[in-house]
């Protein structure tokens, strides 16, 4: 049954909200109606924050994390271990790992993982810049912290092959993260232990 709306403006708002991931039309309608209960000032602040996010947010030129400046706070923090890089799929993984308080190195955000079915290849990811960071000679260890999926493992192996021959240790997070699990949904204790109990990439083939 097609939902009928008493206002074209309401329908337009629902249509746009429903385009967001995880938001169905019922939820979109509830959110749209909720904004009508707010003051114009509050709604303007919400709308402006979204516009500013889209137009003004930067990506760190070093690790590709989201930031407000040219280089993110993590890369600029002198107390972080700059010889240790944790490679993740996206910004959500950075937030998840940081919440564990178990990792004190730097990050490298790929912006996705290799997925031929979705038309995503190595050239669509921030792999070249990872290789360049490693070639600087200032990196001692690369931790591959991608999801335990076929696409994640494929990306891990591709990066491993690209870094072969460089004087750097390559490790993967421990399989406390079950096969098929997404990093961002792991609980903090499990994720923290997986980082601390990481294994050499070569040893991961024996698991």
Image (cartoon, grey):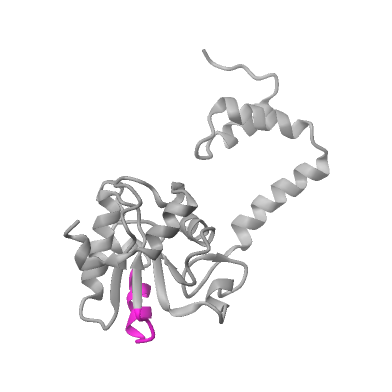
Query: Where is residue 151 drawn, in percent x and y?
Result: 28, 52
Does residue 128 show up magenta in the picture?
yes
Q: Residue furthest left?
A: 206
Query: Where is residue 121 drawn, in percent x and y?
Result: 28, 58
Look at the image and give the residue range highlighted in magenta: 127-140
Tell me, yes or no, if residue 89 can be seen here: no
Q: Residue at x 38, y 79 (%)?
A: 133
Residue closest to the eye, 193 or 181: 193
Query: Where is residue 42 drawn, in percent x and y?
Result: 79, 44
Residue closest to the eye, 90 or 202: 202
Tell me, yes or no, if residue 171 can be seen here: yes
Q: Residue furthest top?
A: 1
Q: Residue at x 47, y 78 (%)?
A: 81
Q: Is residue 206 left or right of residue 127?
A: left
Q: Is residue 118 left or right of residue 19?
A: left
Looking at the rendered structure, the number of numbered marks drawn on it comes to: 0
- Answer above or below: position of 40 versus 28: below
Q: Which quadrant is home to the C terminus?
A: bottom left
Q: Residue furthest bottom?
A: 137
Does residue 164 show up magenta in the picture?
no
- Answer above or below: position of 135 versus 128: below
Q: Residue at x 65, y 50 (%)?
A: 50
Q: Residue at x 70, y 47 (%)?
A: 47
Q: Is residue 74 left or right of residue 170?
A: right
Residue closest to the eye, 79 or 102: 102
Query: Where is residue 195 drawn, in percent x and y?
Result: 40, 62
Residue closest to the eye, 190 or 29: 190
């Amino acid at each position: 049954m097609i939902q009928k709306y008493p206002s074209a403006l309401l329908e337009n708002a629902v249509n746009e909200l429903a385009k967001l991931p995880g938001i169905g039309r019922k939820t979109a309608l509830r959110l749209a109606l909720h904004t009508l209960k707010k003051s114009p000032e509050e709604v303007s602040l919400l709308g402006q924050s979204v516009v500013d996010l889209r137009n003004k947010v930067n990506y760190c030129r070093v690790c590709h994390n989201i930031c407000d400046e040219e280089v993110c706070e993590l890369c600029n923090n002198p107390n972080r271990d700059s010889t240790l890089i944790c490679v993740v799929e996206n910004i959500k993984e950075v937030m998840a790992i940081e919440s564990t308080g178990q990792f004190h190195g730097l990050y490298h955000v790929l912006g996705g993982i290799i997925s031929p079915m979705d038309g995503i290849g190595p050239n669509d990811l921030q792999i070249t810049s990872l290789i360049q960071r490693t070639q600087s000679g200032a990196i001692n260890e690369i931790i591959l912290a991608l999801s335990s999926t076929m696409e994640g493992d494929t990306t891990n192996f591709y990066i491993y092959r690209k870094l072969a021959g460089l004087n750097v240790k390559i490790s993967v997070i421990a399989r406390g993260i079950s096969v098929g699990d997404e990093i961002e949904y792991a609980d903090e204790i499990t994720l923290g232990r997986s980082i601390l109990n990481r294994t050499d990439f070569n040893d991961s083939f024996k698991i």
